Each structure stands twice: as structure tokens, then as C-alpha cells.
Amino acid sequence: MQPKVLIVDDDPAILKMLTRYFRLKLSNITLLTADSGTSALNQLPQNPNLILLDINLPDIDGFTLTNKIRKISTSPIIFLTARVTDQDKVRGLSLGGDDYVTKPFSLAELGARIKAHLRRESLPEKHAQVAIFNNIMINYSAQQVLIDEQVVDFEKKQYQLIAFLSLNPGQVFSREKLYEKLWGYDATGDARVITEHIRRIRNIFSQFKVATPIETVWGVGYKWQG
């Protein structure tokens, strides 16, 4: 089955350019388009495998839309935007975005990023199905974390952090290495988003009165204390 990519942008020239590029260079991908946040949400039942999302939309800003999308879909989101501040990048990635491409952009580079994300999404899982750490259970096949048999609601990247660290207990990883593992070596975002995700993971664990097994190794990075 062909993968589907949803492009969300209110600029007709951008949509026309990307539609032509997909037809010529990415013809094995089914293209869906939306010119507003509302239209994008209406397209989600078609289960796109990846979403290209402009932050500046006429009805819903891209950050708010990302929150809405993440309640429905775990598909990778690549932001397409003229915003280039570190604050915007960290905010977008911490809300559940996966990559950031600034306008104007290279079509060849964008195409490479799309292929890389779709390739990572299609890779089969090659690890244990379930791991238990005291009263924390991680079901890797279902991509769930349970505490005392209760499913805990983590965002996609938060779960991926937990899964990666728990599969490598005792090994210390820098923020940069974790960012590379989760977003890909060619991502252009900010590794500081890792710190924010870990802070949120710890807050969620604390709500269940459980100490997070993610330990800070000062000046180095983080490790899973299993």
C-alpha cells in the first residue's frame, strides 16, 4: 500500500509546487492537501503516514493544530514555516512535531526528509515485547507504559524516549545522541527539547507517585536506572 502524505498550507503556490514535485519525484506516495487547519482535521480519517504542516494557517495556528492532531494521530509531523527562532522550534517539537523545515526550502532536501521519516516509521520493531521495572510495565509492541496495570498517557516522543532508554538500561546518552536517535541524524531542531520531554515524563510519573527511572548524569546526559 502506498504511503500517504498530508500537506497543510494556505499558500496556493506552495501547494501547487509540492503537488508537482510529488507527481514528478515522489509518485509512489499518495498526496493529500489541506489549505486550513479545519480541512486538515477532516483529512485525518484517511490516516496519512506523514504530515507537512505550515504553522501560519488562517483558522488555527500550527501549534494548536499539532495538539489536536496528536489526540488522533501519531504520524510524523514536519513543520514548514518561515519562523526560525529557537523558541518556536523547541515549542513545536515539544508539542509533538518531529522535524522542522524553514521556508524557503530545497525540494530535494524536503524529499529526502520525507523519505527518511517514512522509512523509520516502516521499520519493524526488533526488541522485547514487554519489560517490567518494579511497578512500571512497558509494552513495546503496543507502545504503552503502564503503572500498576493502568495505561499512562504519554506523547509519542515521550514514549519513544522511555522505550529507547529502557532498552539500554545503565547506558548514558547525551541530549544530542537522544535527539539524533529520535528525530534522525539529519534533523535541524534543538536537542534542548529532550530536556523538556524528560521534565514532562518525570512530572507524569510523579502524578502516579512513582519515581522516574530516568536518571540525570550531570554534565553528560541521561540513563535508565532499571
Image: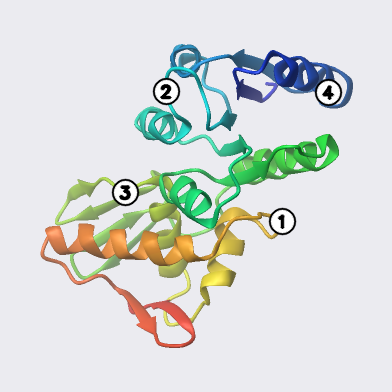
Residue 131 shown left or right of residue 85 in the figure: left
Numbered disc 2: secondary structure: loop
Check contact, mark 3 vs mark 4: CB within 8 A: no
Q: Where is mark 4, residue-wise? A: 21
Q: How many labels were placed on the picture?
A: 4
Q: Residue at x 49, y 48 (%)?
A: 88
Q: Amino acid at mark 1?
A: Asp
The reply to whether discs 4 and 1 touch (Cβ–Cβ < 8 Å) is no
Binning the other alpha carbons within 10 Å of mark 3 as few (below 14), some (14 to 19) or many (20 upward) gives some
User: Which is more foreground, mark 2 or mark 4?
Assistant: 2
Residue at label 3?
154
* Real-space Cα separation, disc 2 to disc 4, in angstroms: 26 Å
- Report which quarter residue 78 is drawn in: top right
Question: Looking at the picture, which amino acid does disc 3 mark?
Answer: Phe
Question: What is the x, y in percent for residue 58?
Answer: 49, 18
Q: Which residue is mark 1?
A: 186
What residue is drawn where x is 85% and y is 38%?
Answer: 108
For marks 2 and 1 on the same chain, the one whose residue lies earlier in the sequence: 2
Q: Position of residue 205 (x, y in %)?
A: 21, 61
Indicate which label's residue lies in the foreground, 3 or 4.
4
**Residue at label 2?**
60
- Say which element carries label 1: loop
Question: In which quadrant of the rendered image does the N terminus lie?
Answer: top right
Q: Residue furthest left?
A: 209
